[in-house]
Image (cartoon, helix red, strand yellow):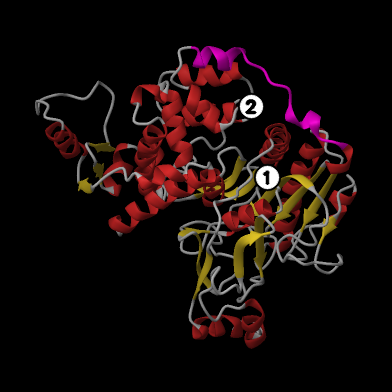
């Protein structure tokens, strides 16, 4: 593992989180000057004592083990193997170590937001939950609190997996309070009491009849109910199509229960979603073949004003250890937004944000949801497929997924989701594999490689300066997003 590269990726994770929340000014204050990695947690603890001039026989509090931190501008951490050994419940995922480092950097971001006042960070459950969310760690997947009483019971519970309960509690309070508000108030004496007693009217009550539509953007890759199924390009496609459609139905029903009068489902793959079950509940499925004015490859005509969006069925990025890992198509090696490597989820967050549409719900594998929550912690996430600590595939049953997706859609309307709009100008760039590599893949599918390469613009690296492929810029005072990259360049 390239540890230097992992640290750089961790910095990018926190930087993306800061930008998404309007905290760009804090990025100018670098949080550490050196990095030191240790083979054992005991060696790390000895170094921490030395850095702070403390007696070397000082013991950690009983029941605790330190695996990372930033001490006097030195980032210290145990190696990935030691982290997985000490905390197998947290450290066994492929990107666990990177996100551990991001977690520690996020603590310093938090302090910088408070002008260096660590005492204002609030109770431990809040600042640790903040760091989990900022680092994009999905430690709390499957744990959803529905009341303040449940959330506080969770954070006060003793025992293992505390960070899981802490981050779930922070996500619960984000349903009713902006993150900036929580950060500003966490250090005050009445912080917890105020959260326990305050109630807020559901924002969805302000939605008017002429703008009460939701949009569900679907991918074809990661439904619930199976460790392997997808809706297209795999042997289990017919089965996967049914599973994915059921996930979409659950999200659509949740939006309708929340009071929205219309829901549109976007199937840009033209065949990943079965329109019949959705038609029975009055929800149309828009595809390139049945819809006029299909201007935006992933999003369709975009002629309505949508108040909330959901992304259903999304996958890991190209190069990640996850499920059906790719970014947009098999010709793309990497996609970046403002020099930060991201995937389709971030791409769509940016695209929907350019239309002033907040994203309130994302489902898919653990990496897709982690990317969404890292950029938009106010969004809800439902992980339907993930890798266990032993590296085995686990998945959420269709029944459990239906409940969570429906409930998350309701909550998304209440909290209005997350509008992802980075500071302008935005640079969106694509790095591709060689023409030869893509040609070889396409030939195995009997595809018209030359035509697809020409239409998708994959022959060079593109960004805002070239104005081709993908771009985001200032147009009439607002963010404008466009994309021509679409389609598959290999059989799957």
Residue span colored magenta: 190-208
Q: Which residue is mark 2?
A: 176
Q: Quadrant of the N terminus?
A: bottom left
* Disc sitting over residue 358 in the figure: 1
Determine which quarter of the picture holds residue 60.
top left
Q: Residue furthest front?
A: 476
Q: Quadrant of the C terminus?
A: bottom right
On screen, residue 438 versus residue 414, left or right, reads left
Sequence order check: which comes first, mark 1 or mark 2?
2
118 or 99, which is in the foreground? 118
- Residue occupying the point 84% across, 50% down: 278
Residue 285: within the magenta?
Answer: no
- Residue occupying the point 46% across, 18% down: 157
* Disc sitting over residue 63 in the figure: none
- Residue occupying the point 27% across, 31% down: 65
Q: Position of residue 392 (x, y in %)?
A: 47, 50
Determine which quarter of the picture holds residue 274.
bottom right
Q: Secondary structure at mark 1?
A: loop
Q: Secondary structure at mark 2?
A: loop
Residue 194: within the magenta?
Answer: yes
Residue 314 visible in this rendered orientation of the protein: no
């Amino acid at each position: 593992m390239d540890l230097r590269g992992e640290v750089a990726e961790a910095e990018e994770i926190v930087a993306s989180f800061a930008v998404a929340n309007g905290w760009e000014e804090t990025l100018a204050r670098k949080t550490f000057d050196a990095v030191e990695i240790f083979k054992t947690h005991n060696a790390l603890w000895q170094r921490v004592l030395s850095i702070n001039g403390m007696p070397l026989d000082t013991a950690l509090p009983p029941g605790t083990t330190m695996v990372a931190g930033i001490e006097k501008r030195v980032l210290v951490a145990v190696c990935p193997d030691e982290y997985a050994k000490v905390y197998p419940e947290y450290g066994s995922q492929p990107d666990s170590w990177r996100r551990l480092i991001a977690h520690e950097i996020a603590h310093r971001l938090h302090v910088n937001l408070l002008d260096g006042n660590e005492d204002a960070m609030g109770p431990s459950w809040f600042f640790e939950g903040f760091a989990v969310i900022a680092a994009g760690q999905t430690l709390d997947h499957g744990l959803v609190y529905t009341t303040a009483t449940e959330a506080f019971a969770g954070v006060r519970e003793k025992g293992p997996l505390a960070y899981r309960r802490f981050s779930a509690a922070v996500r619960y309070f984000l349903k009713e309070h902006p993150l900036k508000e929580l950060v500003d108030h966490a250090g005050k004496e009445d912080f917890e009491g105020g959260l326990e007693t305050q109630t807020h009217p559901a924002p969805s009550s302000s939605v008017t009849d002429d703008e009460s539509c939701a949009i569900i953007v679907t991918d074809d890759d990661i439904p619930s109910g199976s460790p392997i199924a997808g809706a297209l390009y795999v042997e289990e496609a017919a089965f996967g199509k049914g599973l994915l459609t059921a996930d979409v139905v659950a999200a659509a029903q949740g939006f309708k229960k929340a009071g929205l009068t219309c829901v549109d489902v976007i199937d840009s793959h033209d065949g990943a979603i079965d329109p019949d079950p959705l038609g029975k509940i009055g929800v149309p499925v828009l595809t390139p073949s049945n819809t006029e004015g299909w201007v935006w490859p992933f999003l369709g005509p975009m002629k309505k004003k949508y108040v909330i969006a959901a992304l259903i069925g999304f996958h890991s990025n190209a190069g990640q250890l996850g499920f059906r890992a790719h970014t947009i198509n098999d010709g793309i090696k990497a996609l970046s937004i403002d020099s930060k490597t991201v995937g389709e989820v971030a791409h769509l967050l940016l695209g929907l944000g350019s239309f002033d549409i907040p994203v309130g719900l994302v489902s898919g594998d653990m990496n897709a949801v982690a990317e969404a929550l890292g950029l938009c912690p106010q969004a809800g996430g439902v992980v339907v497929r993930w890798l266990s600590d032993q590296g085995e595939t686990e998945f959420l049953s269709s029944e459990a997924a239906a409940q969570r997706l429906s409930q998350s859609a309701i909550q998304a309307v209440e909290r209005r989701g997350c509008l992802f709009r980075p500071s302008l100008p935005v640079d969106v760039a694509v790095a591709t594999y060689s023409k030869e590599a893509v040609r070889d893949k396409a030939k195995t599918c009997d595809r018209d490689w030359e035509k697809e390469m020409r239409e998708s613009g994959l022959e060079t690296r593109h960004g805002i300066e070239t104005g081709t492929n993908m771009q985001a810029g200032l147009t009439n005072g607002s963010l404008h997003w466009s994309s021509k990259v679409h389609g598959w360049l290999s059989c799957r």
